[in-house]
Each structure stands twice: as structure tokens, then as C-alpha cells.
Amino acid sequence: MCGIIGYIGKQKAASILIEGLKRLEYRGYDSAGLSVISREFGVETIKAVGKVANLENKINGRDIGGTAGIAHTRWATHGKPCDQNSHPHTDCRKNIFLVHNGIIENYQELKDNLVKKGHKFSSETDTEIIAHLIEEFNKKTDFKSSVLKTLKIIKGTYGLAIINKKEPDKIIVARLGSPLILGIGREEFIVASDIAAIIRHTNKVIFLEDGEMAVITPENCEIFNAKNKSINKGATELDWSLEKAEKQGFAHFMLKEIFEQPTSISDAVRGRLVVKDGLAKLGGLKDMAEKLRNIKRIVIVSCGTSYHAGLVGEYMLEEYAGLPVEVEYASEFRYRKILLNKNTAIIAISQSGETADTLAAIREGKNKGALTLGIVNTVGSTIARETDAGVYNHAGPEIGVASTKAFTSQLAIFVLLTLFLGRQRDMSLITGKRIAAEMNKIPRLIEKILKQAKAIKKITRKYTRYQNILYLGRKYNFPIALEGALKIKEISYIHAEGYPSGEMKHGPIALIDGNFPSIIIVPSDSVYEKNLSGIQELKARGGKIIAIATKGDKKIKKLTDEVIYIPKTLEMLTPLLSVVPLQLLAYYMGIQRGLDVDKPRNLAKSVTVE
């Protein structure tokens, strides 16, 4: 959601801040702003509603010479998008300037007290009270102590970067529930809420933990814990690169990431599949092997696309590992009385590793004594650090807001996890070898699907005018119907619903007519004949039908208007293939509607506040 970037060093800060903001655009935002500080000119603040380009245009031609500054892309929570509500925010005397990700829950109470003391507010945001609180404390104590006192009385979540006109060679940052990463350069430091804003400058980073604060100068960075004790933290070297985050000739990040899936899936399973033994070798779970052998139940917690990956994982784990599995929306998990114990494993799925609801869910699980595991893509993220063990996707940076390659890499991890847990239990060597061998083929099979991209684009031209689409699937492909519907909603702003095929006649079929097309996932699997019955019912009501079917299925052509073929594979692996045409359909539909498919309206890449 909101993005933070801060710089202090020897270079001019403004250009570095703008470049960092551009790399944060994919997270979703409605306005942007920066404050640059120098001893000669004090603090210069510039804000703009809309794209970062609008902010850049305001700066164009102006010499902003400071070598320290902070910047922000804002996702509106308190107060509409406008210059006054954009960050950075300042105090009455315009000494304190700060940017903030998160929500201050007790802001109204604090604001009322500050107003009584004579403070004047210029925005509708919850963030502005932080600047005024620091100003109030700064009357009697130093900058750092003022920040500490403020952090003790605000309630909620925050990632903060703060500068003070009186101390221009210093940035103070703090974190509670909203990610902050500190990049270490040569006589310079970059702080950001996302690796994407740092990676051009350095791959050496420190991940701040909840309750930690850092005081940064061009020469040094000192980190303090919640008790204000100085602590030493080791740096992590990232394996991401700037090249991986660029479009590399593709029109959009989303299309690039769809076409990267053969590589990202290969990276997810490389070195982990032992085909000759029908095993998965997962280093992240090695120390937990005996505990996992005694697990009697699994609860998967996730949100959005990751939730759909969890639903597919449920089918895999129950059928092949023999474990009862529940899949919960992380956003609802804490508000139910979930029965957990030491024989329960909670699996948290999150591309960013920072999803607020998912993080809260695993913390609740740990409090109840459950074993917590993570499936995350971002090395060193909060969920990766706070779970007992886990598996990285290794999908590389995913910039498009709508998840594509992260989703299929999550499915690949569930295949590995199914092998790992299944072979601990009753899965035979023959079954394990068959799954592992077929999984190794998936990247090549996806390449074959991607070769149909032009044909899929041609199909979408016939359906761009429709405002409603029904997505249907059974068993392993029911979650893919949900995912296909989500993608078309996210990218094309078309109303879509995903349903189990068997539920269609329990309500949704009432919607079907010549203006309400359906997309049905109908591979040649154990529920193929059942799906054919559903197609007949749609056809009888005049509904147009696009089928995702197994190559060689000639029968389906006679029953549907369009067919997109996927190669034959094991039933449990079909979701890795069937989702790819749905991603392409959503992408081309969005393009033909003239939409920004990389940055859909109202959406954020990572939801870091509840």
C-alpha cells in the first residue's frame, strides 16, 4: 500500500527519492510527496495528487540541493487524496517532517489534546498528530527522545521516517507492524518500505523488527530496541537484482511475469525435487521434520490470490498426504474461536511476507501453541522471520499488482510440501516418483501454453464488451475458477464470479443468457463427465462458453464457443497449467479496455494495514 523511501548520504537526495517512488508505484497509491533537508536551505516540501510523474513535473528545473530527505506514496485512509493530506506532514513550527505507513488508532483522542494545547492542524489525516506530538515533546527534550516518547503513546501500526530542521544530518526511522528495510551503501543509507526501492543502490540490507528504531547519519546507523537499548543487527545480502525488476522488452510487468512462469516454477523446485526417490528436499523444514511427522491437522491462512493457492494446497495435502486441512481467510482468522494445539500446523502464504492480516493470524496461532510455517517470496520479510520454519518461493520480484508468477510458484511449493509430508506418511514410492517426475515437466508445458498467447488475445476481442462473466471449475480447478474471476475483476474491472461447477444450478444459472458468458475449466480428469453436464446446461440457456480443456479433447469443441487447450498432466498439477490462459485472458481484456494493468485502480500490491 503506502510506500516510504528515505535517503541520507553524499548525493543529492531529490533524484534518488523520485526514482525510489517510481519503484514503489506498483504498490498502489493516490498521491506522492517529498521533503529534502539541508543546512543551507532548511526543508523543502513538494506534494502532488496522482502519479509520481506529477510530483516530478513540479520539481522539474528546480535545484533542490539537500543530501537527505524522505518521500512517500500515499494510499488514502483518513482524508481524501489532496495536497493537504499527502505526506510528508509537518508540525506547527515546520521543524518536524515525517512520512508514515500504517494507521494510528487513537489519533482523535491525541488530536483533541493537542488542539487544547494550541496546535493547529492542516490535514484530515491520522499521521499529522505524530509530527505535533514530536513537536510538543521536543520543547523539553532532544529529537530522539521526543520520538521515543511519541511512540510510547500512539496506538496502532507504523513505519516512520522523520527529519528535523534543527538536526539536518539525521533521519530517525521506526517500525511497528509496517515493514521498513535499511539499505547500506558507501557513506549513505537508504530506508524503504520495499526492497524494490533499494535494490538499485545496494543489496546489503537490515530488516527492522517491530518495536525497533534507527537513528541514521551519512556515516552511521544505530539501532535501538523498544527499551531504548542499542542493538547490533547483522546485514542480509539479497539475491534480487535491478535487472529482474525491469520489463525487459515486455509492454507491461504483468505480461513479463506471466511469461516468466516457466523460469519461476523451475526456480521454486530446483534442487528440491528428488525424482528417483519420489521425495522433496526442503531445507527450510529440515529441523522441523520430526515435529511435522506428528502433525495431525493443518490450517492454511492467507488472503486474495494466496488464499486460492491455499485452496489448491488443501486438495493436494488431503488426497496425497492424508492430513485434514482447513483454509481460512487470514482477515477472519483472529475473529473466530479457532481450536489449535501443538499437533496443528498453521501455514501462512504471502508473496510479500508483510500482509498484515496474515501476520496477525500466525501470531495468534503461535499464542495458541501451534507450529507456524511460511510460504513467502520475499527473503527476510516479517512472516519469514516470525514463523517457526518455512519455504521460499524464489520467484523473484513481482511488480504487477495482480499476482501471476507468485501464485504458480506457491502452487509449486504446495506440490513439494505434499511430497514432503506425504512420504513421511502413507504415500508410496511409486506415487512420489510419478508426482515428482510430472512436476519437473510443468515449466515446459507452460511454455507450450504461452505459445498460444496471440490466439488467446484474439478470443478476448469477442468478449471485451461483456460486463459479467461466470467462472466454473471442479475439484482441483474450483480454486482456479475463483482465481480467474479475481484476475478479470482486478485487471479488467469486469464483474465476475467463481463457482464450483456443481453449484451453478443452485443459483448462478439464473443469470445465464446470451449476454452472460461463462469460462469453464474442464480438463480430462476424474470430474470431466460432470463438467460436461454443466456445459450442456449453460448451452441450453444460450450462454456463450469458453473452455479450458486438455489437448486432444475433440468432444469439447462441439459443445463450446471457444477452446483453449492445455497439455495433459496429473490431475493434481492441472491448476499450474489451467490458470495461465486465465491470466492471459485477464491481461488482454484489460489492455483492450485501455486500462493500466500493472497498477489497477484502488488496489495495492501488499496490504500492510488491516
Image (spheres, rainbow, N blue to C red):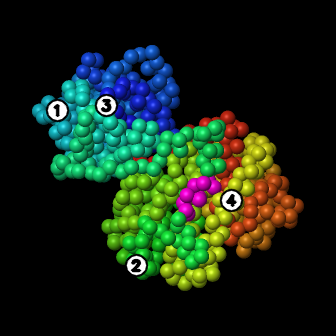
Q: Nearer the viewer, residue 472 or 186?
A: 186
> For numbered disc 1, what is the local secondary structure?
helix
Mark seen at residue 559 = none
**Which amino acid type is marked by label 4?**
Arg
Q: Position of residue 530 (x, y in %)?
A: 75, 71
Determine whether label 1 and label 4 are within 8 Å by CB: no
Extreme residue in the left direction: 140
Residue, disc 1 = 138
Q: Position of residue 70 (x, y in %)?
A: 35, 32
Nearer-N-terminus badge (3/1): 3
Give the CA separation, mark 2 to mark 1. Answer: 54 Å
> For numbered disc 3, what is the local secondary structure?
loop
Nearer-N-terminus badge (1/4): 1
Residue, disc 3 = 9
> For numbered disc 4, what is the local secondary structure?
helix
Give the CA separation, mark 3 to mark 1. Answer: 25 Å
Q: Quadrant of the N terminus?
A: top left
Q: Nearer the viewer, mark 2 or mark 1?
A: 2
Determine whether label 3 and label 1 are within 8 Å by CB: no
Q: Residue at x 47, y 27 (%)?
A: 49
Nearer-N-terminus badge (2/4): 2
Residue, disc 4 = 444
Q: Residues within 10 Å of mark 1 (few under 14, many from 20)?
A: some
Q: Nearer the viewer, mark 3 or mark 1?
A: 3
**Which amino acid type is marked by label 1?**
Asn
Q: Residue at x 64, y 71 (%)?
A: 437
Q: Which residues are magenta?
A: 261-270
Q: Residues within 10 Å of mark 2 (few under 14, many from 20)?
A: few
Residue, disc 2 = 290
Locate residue 221 relative to residue 249 in the image: left or right.
left
